[in-house]
Image: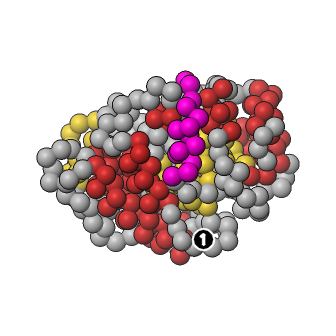
Amino acid sequence: MADTFNYRIDHHGSLVRPVGLSTDDPDSVIQAVREAVAYQRKLRSTVVTDGDFPREDFRSAVLDGVSGFRRTDQTDPDGLVRWVAESLPKAGGPLLADQAARLAELTVIAPKASLPSPAYLAATTFEPGSGITSARELGEALAEIIRAEIELLVSRGVRLIQLNNPLLTSQLATDPADPGALSFEDALAVDGLAARLDERPEGVRIGMAPGWSAPAALDRSRAEQLYAAIPADRWILPFDQGTPAELALIQALPEDRDFCLGVVDATVPALEDIDTVMQRIDAVAEFKDLEDGAVSPSRGFADSANRPLLTAEAQRNKLVLVETIARYCWGNEF
């Protein structure tokens, strides 16, 4: 799929928020987004996001924008507030499209938008006895909403849209984790519905991030099942630990898909050794065309507003390193 729209220097979307920034102060959020756009351009990123600054966490665009969900006082192991589905969701309007249109006014390159996948939301919010028949039914309703939002985003000029399902890679292990409320097969069917667009304008990429880390040992047949079921153009894959499973996850990717390698660990401030990273990428080049590739951090830097993974300075160092690695791979041809 090699072409001129590979967005070589990527990031997942969320950035460390400025100290004291509150989503309750729209003017401050707008100013913070302006500064984030300038920040990304100075770092030579080939994508621009709003840093998730207008939202509480990476799920909020959907959970705050549709009916049928109740916020609880509980948190999950990652510190995310737990939400519970009480009825099938209905959208009351655009989820991200209006914000993306305003973002587009601040940058000469098309903005990127990130959304939680419907399977992830269904798996983490479904409760038996809620009146919803199954997590699959909930996921399919969410998939219709998210697919409609993707179509709207594309119509507003967004050219790179990423769906995040942090649960999928744990299902690719030779000894898969408990899938919980949604089976692996149902999760693939649900996320496949959301990513399936009948028409894509030139340069549009629908990306899928199936998890922040690879399993200890990969079941290749399950990885192939993943790629076959979800028709995403671009796969954002973990590649920061140098494990055989990371390499196997890329090897299983069909030839007609783009790949973005998460080459630096977004959870630790220590910088990766460039030679080591390049040796890993050289290994990929033995079986993949790097013209279909891109690089990024391993995950978002602040998927929850109040729990940044790094300091702002450490984040900047990581993003600079990603840009440097991209230039080692592709020179100045972005």
The x, y position of residue 315, in whole percent, is 60, 38
| Relative side of 121 to 115, left or right | left
Task: Tell me the quarter of the picture where residue 280 sits.
Answer: top right
Which residue is the site of mark 1?
200
Q: Residue at x 50, y 63 (%)?
A: 196
| Relative side of 230 to 167, left or right | right
Q: Which quadrant: the C terminus?
A: bottom right
Of residues 226 and 66, the one nearer the viewer is 226
- Say whether residue 214 is visible: no
Dot 1 lies on which element? loop
Picture layout, residue 60 above or below residue 155: above
- Packing grade of label 1 (10 A; few <14, some 14-19, many >=20) is few
Hey, which residue is sitting farthest bottom in the picture?
Answer: 155
| Relative side of 9 to 29, left or right | right
The x, y position of residue 58, in whole percent, is 43, 49
At label 1, the amino acid type is Arg
Q: Residue at x 68, y 39 (%)?
A: 251
Q: Residue at x 35, y 49 (%)?
A: 121
- Say whether residue 202 is visible: yes
Counting labels gives: 1
**First to last magenta residue range:** 216-229
Provide the major secondary structure of the magenta segment. Answer: helix
Of residues 81 and 284, the one nearer the viewer is 284
Q: Which quadrant: the N terminus?
A: bottom right
The x, y position of residue 182, in whole percent, is 33, 43
Q: Residue at x 62, y 66 (%)?
A: 204
The x, y position of residue 240, in whole percent, is 64, 31
